[in-house]
Amino acid sequence: MAPEAARNAGAIGTAIFFSLAVAYVFCDRRNNSSKNNKKKKPKNGIIDAIGNTPLIRINSLSDATGCEILGKCEFLNPGGSVKDRVAVRIIEEALESGQLRPGGIVTEGSAGSTAISIATVAPAYGCKCHVVIPDDAAIEKSQIIEALGATVERVRPVSITHKDHFVNIARRRAAEANEFALKHKKSQPNGTDIQQINGYKSDEDNHSSLFPNDCQGGFFADQFENLANFRAHYEGTGPEIWEQTEGKLDAFVAAAGTGGTVAGVSKFLQEKNPNIKCYLIDPPGSGLFNKVTRGVMYTKEEAEGRRLKNPFDTVTEGIGVNRVTRNFAEAKLDGAYRGRDMEAVEMARFLVKNDGLFLGSSSAMNCVGAVRIAQSLGPGHTIVTILCDNGMRHLSKFHNAEYLSQLGLTPKATGLEFLGIE
């Protein structure tokens, strides 16, 4: 074949090959697009929309540290926080076990997010919600709960050892709801006497009228000690993180309130790969940092679990505790970091300014923890944390300039210098 003819044949062959390649890619993309569109079916109600939240790269923190810092966007759940997962799991397990019946009242003591989530999902199961909340929690949280149709009791904050701690009151309210249901429903349709409601046997005659006449008893969600909390993350959040990172992550960090998130995720990840390091970031006033790093929860000045006043001295809400809950006991942690309020406040403002992320106080503290780990591990590592909720339910306190000024927490940083990054 003549050189020119050979060149022409080669050019034609190249053109044909290129055209086929483009056609293949185009068709493949169309097929994939068609497959993806088929997968995007309507969700079956609000419950089906909970979970499978996106994992995003937090660009500003990643660029500043040389690590890939990824945040799981739990604020995109229907109820606006990571606690949606917990609420669903607690209610479903209670209904399955018979501890809760449709028409029953789920009671909970909560600083806000769990209560909002229970109030959001309970109606989908035909249940109602009664929340006891400390009166130092941001007022918009109780307003949201009430707007969702739940009953709200605001009480003064005291130690968990006090009978009137908000959690202990919520436990009593569940028992009272069961007693109320027994009192107002004397017999079954067949005329037989009712002796028990949701496993509760009546032995008293007098209870308050906090509950509607059609109340089918009460169930105390007990988010701190109910291991359904842990299971929601061990079987949900943890596997999602593993899949979204394709198992390529070096560390995970989160703060703990009930301990369910950090426990469920850390245990799952370390079972998948023991080399993944899992850490706690703990706010001021909490004893978990000492428990993880030193094995004790108390200082010389106080015995563990003996504090009778509000144990927390922090602007953050929903995180920090001075006891080891059943959920936290399941955690597999390699260490802990102590976070400061000023760092959380500055981090929240930094992320709004640089990433458009408007986060709540616990999410900001988690991001502080992620940067601390990045500094410890050095560039080139992948670190995952939880973006628990957004800033909309923190407007009266954590995102209130006047309130922060009164506490000496007015943010002043222009970058990440508050964490030693210039």
Image (cartoon, rainbow, N blue to C red):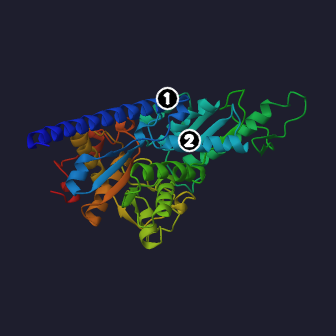
Q: Secondary structure at mark 1?
A: loop
- Between marks 1 and 2, how big is the CA–CA gap? 24 Å
Q: Nearer the viewer, mark 1 or mark 2?
A: 1
Residue 315: where, in percent of width, then height? Answer: 36, 48
Image height of 150 relative to 110, above or below:
above
Q: Quadrant of residue 213?
A: top right
Instruction: Using residue 401 as the reference point, say whether residue 81 is left or right of it.
Output: right
Residue drawn at (17%, 39%) of the image: 9
Q: Residues within 10 Å of mark 1 (few under 14, many from 20)?
A: few
Q: Secondary structure at mark 2?
A: helix
Between discs 1 and 2, the one toward the N terminus: 1
Q: Which mark is residue 87?
A: 2
Please name the amino acid that badge 2 sits on: Ala
Q: Residues within 10 Å of mark 2 (few under 14, many from 20)?
A: many
Residue 135: where, in percent of width, then height? Answer: 47, 41
Residue drawn at (41%, 47%) of the image: 317
Quadrant showing the C terminus: bottom left
Residue drawn at (53%, 63%) of the image: 306
Residue 373: where, in percent of width, then height? Answer: 31, 61
Residue 18: where, in percent of width, then height? Answer: 23, 38
Residue with the mark numbered 1: 41
Q: Quadrant of residue 274?
A: bottom left
Please name the amino acid that badge 1 sits on: Lys
- Between 332 and 102, which is closer to the camera in this rendering? 332
